[in-house]
Image: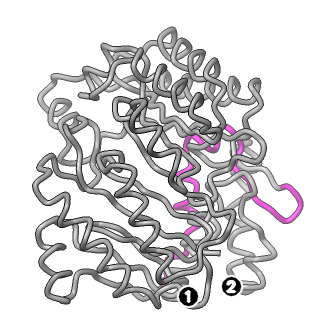
Amino acid sequence: MSGVYFHIPFCKQLCHYCAFHKSISLQAKEEMLECFKKELKYRKDYLGEESVATIYFGGGTPSIYQPHEIESLIDEVAKYFTIDSDAEITLEANPDDLSETYLRALQNTPVNRLSVGIQSFHDEDLILMNRRHTGKEAFEAIRRAQEFGFDNISVDQIYGVPGLSMEKWIENLDLVFELDIQHISSYHLMFDPNTIFTKKLEKGQLVELDEEQSFEQFKYLIDKARENGFHHYEISNFSKEGFISKHNSSYWKQEKYLGIGPSAHSFNLKEREWNIAHNYKYIKAIKEEAEFSEKEHLSFYDRFNDFVLTSLRTYWGMDLETVRKDFGDQLYNHCLAKAEKYIISNHVRQDGNSLILCDEGVFISNDIMSEFFWVEDE
């Protein structure tokens, strides 16, 4: 099983929290589409003989392309790879793009999963984040997609936003669960470098939400999601039975994936590769058949640290027998030793052969995972 990811690097306006590669200039939109297709041809051997189980259009704002243009990229994947008959094909979309006309056309493409960037149903928060839609438009967009037969829908929500009270967070989640969707991706607001939010924070124009308040919002999300039949299967992701994101799970299960487009990442079990994060340099390189990516060969310990990072994010956890089989007794004993204090503090639990983060551990997951990493001079 492998996946193909398209990074669509265009947005109509910039969200103030977003650190992903994107541009609000749409001049290269058509040219970029052709470069995606050329890159697919150049890299047709990257996944070996494996079939494609997932295709994911992320960004940026993939719904900036019309359904027939998205379908043309799926057709292009089919030229060079075998796509599984039950492949999960996801389109990230902004609510205001999901008009009746758009959804009617999308209904006739192979896209079978929508990931809708709502973030909040409160207009004051959406204005603060510089989102393009209102809360009402977001709610109506999901209802409209359901009317057009889309029955595998994920929505994004952000907690820890400056000024987000627990009352407003509860109202956000009440509306999410009222929509009866299948999947939720919910992230804590990050103040990444070079974002407008970070610049405002540094100038004192924003006040970061207290960590305790953020934790309470996260805890409420976990509890409320479980009450509504969702599995908390990864740090930031919740799904109804049978609706785990197959594409994102391939990252956490260490499966191959091919990334197409500027800034897209690829992984073939031996190397990590990432494309240049610049639209015009990417287009120029693709057209000239020049180098457009960088590679990093993964050492034995790199692969172990990747395994720690990806497996501990999930509800199936880090399998210790896999550690012993693939990485040897030294790293197996290393994991047991590192786990001990976190098991005692109820941040990690051992379930059979697996080490799994408890709810309290999920909130400090980065600190825990970094302790399990192997530094080569240890």
Residue 328: x, y in percent? 72, 86
Asked whether the beta carbons under mark 1 and mark 2 sit within 8 Å of each other, the answer is yes
- The dot on residue 300 is 1
Residue 353: x, y in percent? 85, 65
Residue 318: x, y in percent? 71, 64
Q: Nearer the viewer, residue 358 or 297?
A: 297
Q: Is residue 84 rendered to the left or right of residue 135?
A: right
Give the CA distance from mark 1 to mark 2: 8 Å
Residue on which disc 2 sits: 327
Residue 174 appears anywhere in the view: yes
Identify residue type, mark 2. Phe
Residue 378 appears anywhere in the view: no
Q: Is residue 73 rendered to the left or right of residue 269?
A: left
Q: Could you tell me which secondary element the residue under label 1 belongs to?
A: helix
Residue in the image at 58% along x and 60% along y: 247
Residue in the image at 36% along x and 85% along y: 41
